[in-house]
Amino acid sequence: MYKDQILMDGITDMVFVVTVKNKSEFIYYFINRAAIDKTGLTQNIIGKTIGEVHSKNTAKFLYKQFEKVVASGESITYEDSFVAPSGEKCYLKIKLTPLFDEQKNCKQIVAVIRDITREKLSEIKIKVAWKKLNESKQRYQSLFQNNSDAILLIDLNGRILDGNKSVESVTEYKVDELIGLSLNSIIVEEDVRFVSNLLSMATNGFINKSYLTMKTNTGNKIEVTIKIIPIIIDNGIIGVYCIFRDITSLLESRKKLEESDKRFKIITEHANDLITLVNEKGIIIYASPSYKKMLGYDYKEYVRKLFLHNIHPDDKDDLSKTFVQSIKEGTSFTVQFRQFNYKNEIIWSEASGSPVYGEQQGFKYMVVTTRDIGIHKEYEMKLEYLSMHDSLTGLPNRRFFNKQLEKALNELRTSNNGLAVIMMDIDDFKRINDTFGHDIGDEVIEEFGKRISKAIGKDNIVARLGGDEFVILLPSISSSGSVLSIAKIIQYEMQKTWNIKGHNLDVTTSMGIALSNSNVSPQLILKSSDTALYDAKNTGKNSFKLQEVNKVVSD
């Protein structure tokens, strides 16, 4: 338990362990340091029920989730949120994992709670920033393409002679009001000399384009582009065309665009997670600088490449289907997969994606945030290993054995092989415990498991069912002679010297063997091997019996 305490306190996720009582009551058994720090709960909750610790509504919700785990016997994952005392909304991802005893009863549930507030808020900020950026670009494009130009006809003395219909929309003057006036009269004072120079250059045959500030009829100042083109008739310049375009709104939009772009850049450059934008063809159109930190690649190396190009081959198909479904249904997704870093090492990752659509509801791009979950994956695998293995011997447990037995029986339907199960225990093990103590007894069980493993080889499976009871699965046995040979090898291993902490022991085993070459149920073959073991015990122990379609073969 001390090692487990160090392991639990060493991770940043909140971890709770509850004990299951009568399948419907849940009592706190363990809380790690991270959970104490983040929730304000203390070790005082140990031994209390969920109802005693939490409010009525919270307890009701938690009971519902834990009861799902007990009923299904499988892990569940869900997301939740709450408002912290500071007033901030926090997001959580919770995984509930059942732990079983030797009778396959759910005795405890491990709750691992990860704070995903930063990822959620980052995803929201990215969506908002990118949406504003895209809207600004659309406004910029609309202004650029659709605004009509105002054109004035100017003589060589800088007097206005005529203008087009768009002049009024730009200057707020009617053309008749401008005829005869100097061009300088509608230009701000600080730009008058500059415009005079442009006109002078135009009368010498040069075309010029620049920017200046113009005064409207209502006294407003607007920013315009001006293009001055000489009017040439019979090889002589008789005047100029002045083409104006109001760019006031354009400059404001550009400024907002630059500010939005800057905010988006700040978010992505300081993010630890990978931030990726993927178009409808699955090609990356944006990659954050964090690619360098997480995978060792410069983010520029990813742009214009397929999102799947560096994904583990076994995960590409599922990831691609997830993308397509998300785009089709307009829903977000979270998926785990493997990708490679620059050293070609596998990095377990978790990606959260959300599709973004344009004004016409057409898909534009997918916003994907990806984080490294290597540590969490390793922790999950350790939990999975503990749920499938015996804590004393390290051998597979009953749950693991039953899954492998069912798998082997399914394969037996399509193959010509046979299958054998050997049920066995240690003869007079109670005497060993009573005489030498449970510590010696535990070491005998460990050594017993090692000797069986050595005798049966790597292709077969030995599991500890509990106490001194073990079971062996031989998935590719086609004859009674083969399985009896293995039983004799096991007996030979047990006959070797037993010296446990200075004590010389005489350890033997009795075995019950069930052999099948046909489609049988797991219950039937286990019952047959158990019956054979009972028969072996009755013949004086240190022996084995084999049942094959009610035919009994002894040693």
Image: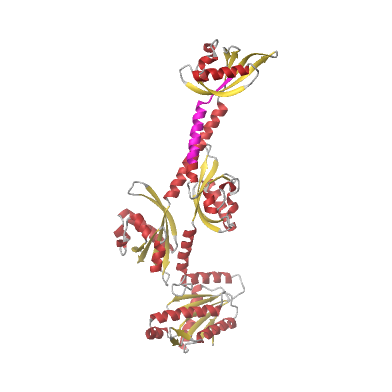
Instruction: Indicate whether 11 appears above or below 86.
Output: below
Instruction: Indicate whether 497 appears above or below 323.
Output: below
Residue in view at x 53 percent, y 22 percent = 212
Q: Quadrant of the N terminus?
A: bottom left
Q: Please indicate, yes or no, whether residue 166 appears anywhere in the rendered image.
A: no
The residue furthest right is 234
Relative depth, front residue between 319 and 84: 84
Relative depth, front residue between 479 and 509: 509
- Horizontal arrangement in the rendering, residue 187 relative to residue 115 (left or right): right
**Which secondary structure is most common in the magenta stretch?**
helix
Instruction: Indicate whether 80 appears above or below 421.
Output: above
Relative depth, front residue between 453 and 6: 6
Q: Is residue 210 magenta?
A: no
Q: Is residue 254 magenta?
A: yes
Q: Quadrant of the C terminus?
A: bottom right
The residue furthest bottom is 540
Instruction: Indicate whether 345 appears above or below 396.
Output: above
Q: Please indicate, yes or no, whether residue 465 appears anywhere in the rendered image.
A: yes
Q: Could you say where residue 82 lies in the image, as x and y percent from the top left?
A: 36, 50
Q: Could you say where residue 336 lies in the image, as x and y percent from the top left?
A: 51, 55
Q: Could you say where residue 524 lies in the image, as x and y percent from the top left?
A: 50, 76
Q: Which residues, given as a range, are shown in magenta? A: 242-264
Residue in view at x 32 percent, y 63 percent = 46
